[in-house]
Image (spheres, helix red, strand yellow):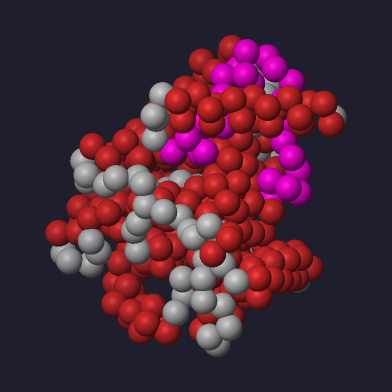
């Protein structure tokens, strides 16, 4: 396993080098993702880094939490109307997505339902497994959703919104006081492991977010994690997406992965409509509106918001609401649908 992990890191690092030499965007995110994806599809026996990869999300949690200031809290009421649109958005996705996966992809009802829900990949896979879904189909659809969105969203930001994805994600570690770094590490570990102990969903990112937000509001934490930590988080997140395709067969590529990619096209139309709605009504600036309604992974969208220099707090409030609504509502809605419909 150690050799497989070392090989995976080496391949991902090679992706960073290639993307950097070719001057391609986001080399620490897209380089590892592209290199790992290609290697996985070619049959390489890649392996993720386990808890090290999970720790990358805690870095993002601290970065987001450090952005929660008294000034931000004062702005929350202005976000309520656009946040209230999130449940409507999720309902529209479900109404379109479930029939799509049933009729186009041939999924059973349980798998189709959880494949359509725009929640976290891990959460939806676990809930679907408990309900009797096809776990392989489910996991591939959600990983493909994250992959395609992470490729398409930056292109839209650059080509349509004119955003330069060069915003510095943080200060160098050498410029951050050691006491501040120690506080960040403590917030990450206490939030992550404490969140796991109490059963908090998405504990690796939400636990550190909550702890660091509290420290920021109390005036104890003043800075985001250093640039090196955030670049490492990009590297691990990108590599993790690519590694998820290990063992995918040609048949799965033609069916499940292609279906998942096509569904992202449907999501793009719905996300575009919601973006136009909140933008034209003045509920959100264009870039923040776009990022807030892109149904990508919470960690991935957080990282993209950082790189784009968007209002991180605005984007995260909307994504946290989406994930929370899906996690709390999806199992309940599924049970209601199952009780009212004949087996199929």
As drawn, 319 above or below 214: above
- Quarter of the image that includes the C terminus: top right
Q: Is residue 232 visible?
A: yes
Locate residue 272 relative to residue 209 in the image: left or right.
left
Q: Nearer the viewer, residue 231 or 319?
A: 231
Q: Is 245 situated above or below 238? A: above
- The N terminus, quarter of image: top right
Stretch of the chain drawn in magenta:
26-54
Please report the residue visible at 30 percent of the width from the left and 67 percent of the height from the top.
82
Q: Residue at x 41, y 67 (%)?
A: 313
- Tell me if residue 185 is in the magenta stretch: no
Q: Could you say which quadrant of the image residue 213 lies in?
A: bottom right
Q: Which residue is drawn at 25% across and 64% down?
A: 284
Find the residue positioned furthest to the front: 174
Residue drawn at x 58%, y 40% is 235
Give x and y (percent) for residue 245: 62, 26
Magenta residue check for 33: yes
Rendered position, 322 above or below 44: below
Residue lying farthest to the bottom in this orientation: 218
Identify the main secondary structure in magenta. helix
Q: Where is residue 260 in the image (x, y as percent from the top left)?
A: 48, 30
Q: Is 198 on the left-hand or right-hand side of 275? A: right
Q: Position of residue 124 (x, y in %)?
A: 60, 47
Q: Is residue 102 visible?
A: no
């Amino acid at each position: 396993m150690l050799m497989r992990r070392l090989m995976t890191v080496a391949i991902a690092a090679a992706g960073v080098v290639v993307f950097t030499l070719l001057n391609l965007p986001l080399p620490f995110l897209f380089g590892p993702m592209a290199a790992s994806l290609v290697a996985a599809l070619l049959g390489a026996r890649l392996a993720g880094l386990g808890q090290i990869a999970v720790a990358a999300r805690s870095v993002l949690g601290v970065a987001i939490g450090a952005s929660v200031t008294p000034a931000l809290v004062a702005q929350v009421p202005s976000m309520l109307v656009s946040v209230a649109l999130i449940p409507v958005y999720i309902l529209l996705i479900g109404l379109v997505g479930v029939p799509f996966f049933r009729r186009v992809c041939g999924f059973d009802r349980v798998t189709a339902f959880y494949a359509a829900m725009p929640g976290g990949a891990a959460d939806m896979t676990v809930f679907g497994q408990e309900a009797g879904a096809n776990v392989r189909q489910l996991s591939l659809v959600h990983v493909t959703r994250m992959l395609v969105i992470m490729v398409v969203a930056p292109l839209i930001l650059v080509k349509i919104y004119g955003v330069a994805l060069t915003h510095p994600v943080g200060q160098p570690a050498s410029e951050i006081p050691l006491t501040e770094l120690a506080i960040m590490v403590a917030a990450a570990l206490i939030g992550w492991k404490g969140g796991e102990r109490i059963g908090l969903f998405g504990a690796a990112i939400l636990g550190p977010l909550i702890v660091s937000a509290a420290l920021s509001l109390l005036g104890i934490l003043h800075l985001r994690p250093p640039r090196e930590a955030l670049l490492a988080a990009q590297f691990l997140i990108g590599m993790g997406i690519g590694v998820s395709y290990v063992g995918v067969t040609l048949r799965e590529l033609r069916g499940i992965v292609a279906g998942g990619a096509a569904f992202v096209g449907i999501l793009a139309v719905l996300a575009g409509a919601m973006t136009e709605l909140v933008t034209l009504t003045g509920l959100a600036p264009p870039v923040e509106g776009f990022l807030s309604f892109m149904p990508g992974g919470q960690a991935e969208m957080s990282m993209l918001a950082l790189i784009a220099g968007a209002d991180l707090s605005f984007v995260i409030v909307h994504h946290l609401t989406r994930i929370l609504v899906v996690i709390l509502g999806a199992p309940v809605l599924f049970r209601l649908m199952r009780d009212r419909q004949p087996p199929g």
